[in-house]
Image (cartoon, rainbow, N blue to C red):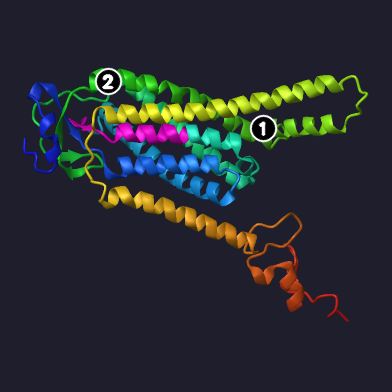
Amino acid sequence: MSNTTFPDLAGLILTDEDNICAYAISGQYGALVRVVFILTLVVGIIFYKHDWVLGGTLVFTITYSSTVAIHLILLTFNAVIWPRMGVSSPNKALDLDILPASFILQTAMSASIQIRLRSFYVRGAPAGTGLVLTVWQCLLTATDWAVLIVFQLIDSPVPPSTGICSANYGFLREDQPVIELENTFEEDWGSFTSITLVPWIWSIICMVSVGAYWLRFRGKSFHEFRRRMKRLVHTMDPSSPSLPFLEYTYHRLHIAIRVVHFLSWCALIAHIIAMEYALRKNQLPVGEGLASVGQWAPAVGCVLTLVGSGVIFGFEKDGFTTKGKKGTPRSRGRLCSPINQQQWGYTIPSAGAGNQFSPTPEEQP
C-alpha cells in the first residue's frame, strides 16, 4: 500500500496475513491532549480547596469526557449493535480511537470519585450543580459498562483481516486513509481488558456515590453524620460514660476516611500509568502531529477555561455574583452590593416585592 500519508509506518507493514486495517488515532486523543487532561485532573484534585481551580477543572473535564463518552457510544453502536440489527455492515477497519477514548473515560470516572471524596466545595454544591455532576457520573458509568460488555461479547475490537487496506468511508471518519498495522491486538487485548477491571470497581463506587448524593438531600449525608458526631464529642459532659465510646468511634471514622482518600488517590495514579503504558506499548500511530490544531486546541481550551473560571470567581469575590444567601437579594455587580445600595440611596428588594427600588429610611417621610 502507499505509505505517503504516514511515512513513519514503513517498519510496521508486514505481510497481508499478519496485518490489520485501521484508522489512525485522531488528534483529539493524541499524547498532548491526554497529558493536558491528566495534568488538569491532578491539579484540580491537589488544589481542591481553591474554588476557581476546581471549578475550571470540572468544566473542562465534564465537557471533554462527555464528548468522549458520546463518541464511544456511537463507536459501540457502529461496531456491534447496528450491524446485528442490519442497519449497516461492519467496518473492515479498526478505529483506533476506541482505545484512548476508553482510557480518557475511565480516568475521568476515577477522578470524579476522587473529587467528590475530597472537595467540600463539590459535596456542598447546590442541588442544580450536584444534579449535573450526578448526571455526568451516570453517563460515564453507563458508557463504560456498555463498552466493556461489548468488548466481552466480541472478544476483541479487531475485525477480520481483509489483506488489502485502502481508503474507504468509515463511520465518523469520512474519507480518511486506512493504514496497515501489525496484528498484535489479539494478544495484547487480554492485558488491556484486565486493566479495565479497575474501572469496573470504580463504576460500582461511582453508583454508590450517586446514591450517597441523593441520600444527602434526605438528611442522611455521611459527612453530615461525621460533623454531628464531632460536635457531640466536643459538647458532651466529660463525666459522661458514653464519651469514651463516641471518641473512639469518631477517631476511627476519621482514620477510615483518610485511608479511603489515600487508596483512591493511589488507585487513580496506578490506573493512569497502566493505561498509558498499554497505549504506548504498541506505538499506535496518530493521524495528526503535535503542531496540528486537533492536538493543541483542547490544551488551549483547558487554559482558557481555567482563566475564565478565575475571572468569574474573582467577580463573585468582589461583589459580581448571581448567588445570594437565603432571604437576601441577588447581587449582579458592585452597584448592587449593600454598601453601594446605601451610598446611592436605594435598596433592592427580595423576590416577590413590588417596586424595583425602594427609598432608604432617610428618604422616607
Measured from the top left, where is residue 208 in percent x and y?
Answer: 58, 27
Give the magenta part as a residue range.
89-109
Membership of 131 in magenta stretch? no
Amino acid type shown at disc 1: Leu
Residue 142 shown left or right of residue 328 in the figure: left
Measured from the top left, where is residue 209 in percent x and y?
Answer: 58, 31
Q: Which residue bears the numbered disc 2? A: 188
SS under mark 2: helix
Whole-angstrom CA distance, mark 1 to mark 2, is 42 Å
Q: Nearer the viewer, residue 202 or 290?
A: 290
Other-residue count near label 2 (Cα within 10 Å), few / some / many at <14 / 14–19 / ≥20: some
Q: Which residue bears the numbered disc 1? A: 215
Relative vertical location of residue 79 with respect to residue 177 in this rendering, above or below: above
Measured from the top left, where is residue 142 in percent x and y?
Answer: 45, 31
Which quadrant: the C terminus? bottom right
At 86% across and 23% down in the image, what residue appears? Answer: 243
